[in-house]
Image (spheres, grey):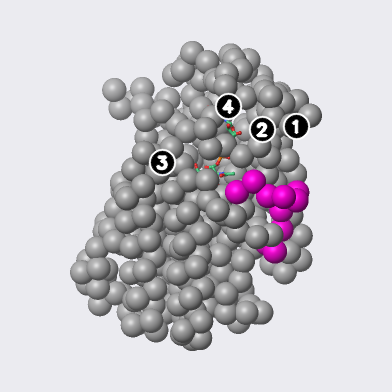
Amino acid sequence: MEKQILVTGGVGYIGSHTVVELLESGFEVIIVDNLSNSNMNALDGIEEITGKRPLFEKLDVCNKSQLSSFFEKYSGIEAIIHFAAFKSVSESVANPLKYYHNNLTSTINLLYFMKKKDIPYMVFSSSCTVYGQPDELPVSEKAPVKKATSPYGNTKQVMEEIISDTLLSTPSLKAISLRYFNPIGAHPSALIGELPTGVPDNLIPFITQTAIGIHDELKVFGDDYNTPDGSAIRDYLHVVDLAKAHVVALQRLLKKQNKANYEIFNLGIGKGVSVLEAIESFERATGEKLNYKIVDRRAGDVEKVWGDTSYANKELGWKAEISLDDAMLSAWNWEKYLKKRKNINT
Ligand code: UD1
């Protein structure tokens, strides 16, 4: 029987784009998702893009008995790509227990079944948030993990530690943590993309929602940072580039090319972009004019962070290729598609 790849959170933003790349690389995929922050339209989008509908089971990875039945049913799983997690920094500050419970329990449960069912490989969805405000930029994987600035960030740090400790005790398991910088944009088909519930926290969905008229204006959080134009700096990479990195990491494990049982890679474009530069890029790429105003800094934001991605470039043979302007255009095409879909459904 063909080996299968389990993708948790596979109908979410990064998950759905990764499933497309996996299917297009010939993998057989099973998605589990509790749909808490995603919806089944993404599955239709995946099918429309690839011509294949992956197996899907609606379940909560935190529920051990549901997971146990799942692993009884599917015995051919060789690797897990683990996306299922909550990801809002602000919500995690307001409701830390929800974040600790969900993000840690799901990871512990998956590792438990990896041991029990001899599933050797995991690719884990981590974040540059583990670096906090780094002392040196660009930040490399060797930089110290600093005290997290939010419970969300802390869950990513602790999840990495749980994985690393479990691998130490069980050398038959191997994992790769991918520390993403800021994923943006949507599939070029505009059939899948980011689907924020409620008012988006993140910059790019707020930009596109403002341009399409959902919000009157974008608030730029701070222009008094120690940066060339005063606004905060991030490393924005296109979600399709990011999705492709997951396939490469998975193949590295499957082909036993990993150099240690646990490896960590930064994934970004390797260049810092300010909020004001991101707005300019959006306007240039789409021809839309964005209404924005400068307001106070947002609590908990770091001033500047971008990645040293040379290790991923060299070891994985992966490089982010899609430009910021193209990423902005793809996000805008997705926003327009969402509006069209809403109009059809109302
Ligand atoms: C943070 C985390 C990231 C995590 C993500 C999850 C860090 C460095 N990054 O991303 O790891 O995956 O949350 O949501 O901890 N901005 C505005 N106006 C807005 C929205 C954002 O000016 O309406 C600014 C922010 O102040 C920031 C930049 O845009 O400077 C990017 O913000 P956002 O998209 O929310 O991502 P991060 O906070 O960097």
Label 3 vs label 2: CA separation? 21 Å
Label 3 vs label 1: CA separation? 26 Å
- For the magenta stretch, what is the residue range? 132-142
Q: In percent of the image, x 61 and y 66: which residue is there?
A: 264
In this figure, which residue is indicated by the disc labeled 4?
A: 297
Mark before the other along the chain sequence, 3 or 4:
3
Q: Are marks 3 and 1 in contact (CB under 8 Å)?
A: no
On the image, the x and y values in percent for residue 231 come to: 68, 28
Is residue 101 toward the left or the right of residue 181 in the image?
left
Q: Are marks 3 and 2 in contact (CB under 8 Å)?
A: no
Label 1 vs label 4: CA separation? 13 Å
Residue 139 magenta-highlighted: yes
Q: In percent of the image, x 76 and y 66: which residue is there?
A: 314
Label 3 vs label 4: CA separation? 16 Å
Mark before the other along the chain sequence, 2 or 4:
2
Say whether residue 23 is visible: no
**Mark seen at residue 227:** 1
Location of residue 241 with respect to 332 vertically, above or below: below
The amino acid pointed to by label 1 is: Thr
| Rendered-image quadrant of the C terminus | top left
Label 2 vs label 1: CA separation? 7 Å
| Rendered-image quadrant of the N terminus | bottom left
**Ligand 1 near label 3 (Cβ, under 8 Å)?**
no
On the image, the x and y values in percent for residue 41 come to: 36, 43
Q: Are marks 2 and 1 in contact (CB under 8 Å)?
A: yes
The amino acid pointed to by label 3 is: Val
**Mark seen at residue 93:** 3
How crowded pointer 4 is (Cα within 10 Å; few <14, some 14-19, many 20+) is rated as: some
Q: Quadrant of residue 71?
A: bottom left
Q: Quadrant of residue 223?
A: top right
